[in-house]
């Protein structure tokens, strides 16, 4: 069974070699806002948060980075990077959602392409909004 764990900013360097391939691959599908090294700086500075999925052997097999955006009516957990092996697993997703709720998020959002939007909508129950998927938490 996989467990989702937060990686504090002071431990990003310790796990970076394990997550960097997943991050690099996921960022290939982004619009080029930043590269993996620049994302690492944002994580170390605490501007974004990293969560990892680890298996029973403590091997990292998935990563997600999140940036919180506070609006007057909602606290949005904006997923900036999501990748790895079997990260669409419902056990992983339910732990991720629970952590978002405990962090005060009222909604989850992610920007995606049409094919990934269909996956988010089917697997996680999000709805597409301008190819921004969103789910109330």
Image (cartoon, helix red, strand yellow):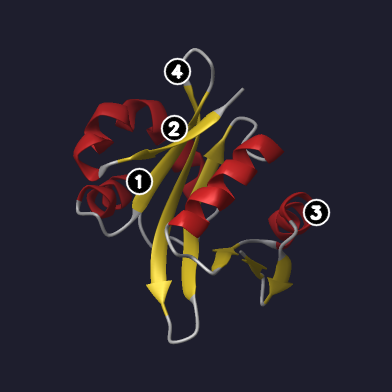
| Horizontal and vertical percent position of residue 67 | 39, 62
Q: Name the residue carrying label 4.
A: 58
> What crowding class fits label 1: few (fewer than 14 Cα within 10 Å), some (14-19), or many (20 or more)?
some
Quadrant housing residue 51: top left
Q: Name the residue carrying label 2.
A: 21
N-terminal-most mark, 3 or 4: 4
Q: Name the residue carrying label 1.
A: 36
| Horizontal and vertical percent position of residue 14 | 25, 28
* Residue depth check, mark 3 versus mark 4: number of the one nearer the observer: 4
How much space separates mark 1 and mark 4, taking CA atoms?
Answer: 23 Å
Q: Residue at x 65, y 32 (%)?
A: 86
Q: Residue lying furthest top in this view?
A: 57
N-terminal-most mark, 1 or 2: 2
Q: Name the residue carrying label 3.
A: 122
When the figure is inspected, residue 129 is found, relative to residue 5, above or below; the finding is: below
* Residue depth check, mark 1 versus mark 4: number of the one nearer the observer: 4
C-beta proximity under 8 Å, tags 3 and 4: no
Q: Residue at x 61, y 37 (%)?
A: 92
> What crowding class fits label 4: few (fewer than 14 Cα within 10 Å), some (14-19), or many (20 or more)?
few
How much space separates mark 2 and mark 3, taking CA atoms?
Answer: 26 Å
- In the displayed structure, does residue 24 sit left or right of residue 126? left
Secondary structure under tag 3 reads helix
C-beta proximity under 8 Å, tags 2 and 4: no
How much space separates mark 3 and mark 4, taking CA atoms?
Answer: 29 Å
| Horizontal and vertical percent position of residue 27 | 47, 49
Say if residue 28 shows up in the picture: no
Secondary structure under tag 1 reads helix
Say if residue 9 shows up in the picture: yes
| Horizontal and vertical percent position of residue 132 | 62, 70
C-beta proximity under 8 Å, tags 2 and 3: no
């Amino acid at each position: 069974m996989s467990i989702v764990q937060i990686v504090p900013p002071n431990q990003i360097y310790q796990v970076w070699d394990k997550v960097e391939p997943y991050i690099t691959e996921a960022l290939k599908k982004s619009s080029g806002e930043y590269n993996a090294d620049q994302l690492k700086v944002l994580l170390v500075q605490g501007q974004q948060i990293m969560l990892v999925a680890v298996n029973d052997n403590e091997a990292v097999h998935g990563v997600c980075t999140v940036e919180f955006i506070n609006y007057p009516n909602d606290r949005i957990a904006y997923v900036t990077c999501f990748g790895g092996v079997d990260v669409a697993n419902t056990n992983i997703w339910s732990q991720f959602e629970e952590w978002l709720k405990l962090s005060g998020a009222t909604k989850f959002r992610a920007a995606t392409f049409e094919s990934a939007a269909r996956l988010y909508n089917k697997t996680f129950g999000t709805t597409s909004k301008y190819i921004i998927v969103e789910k109330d938490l």
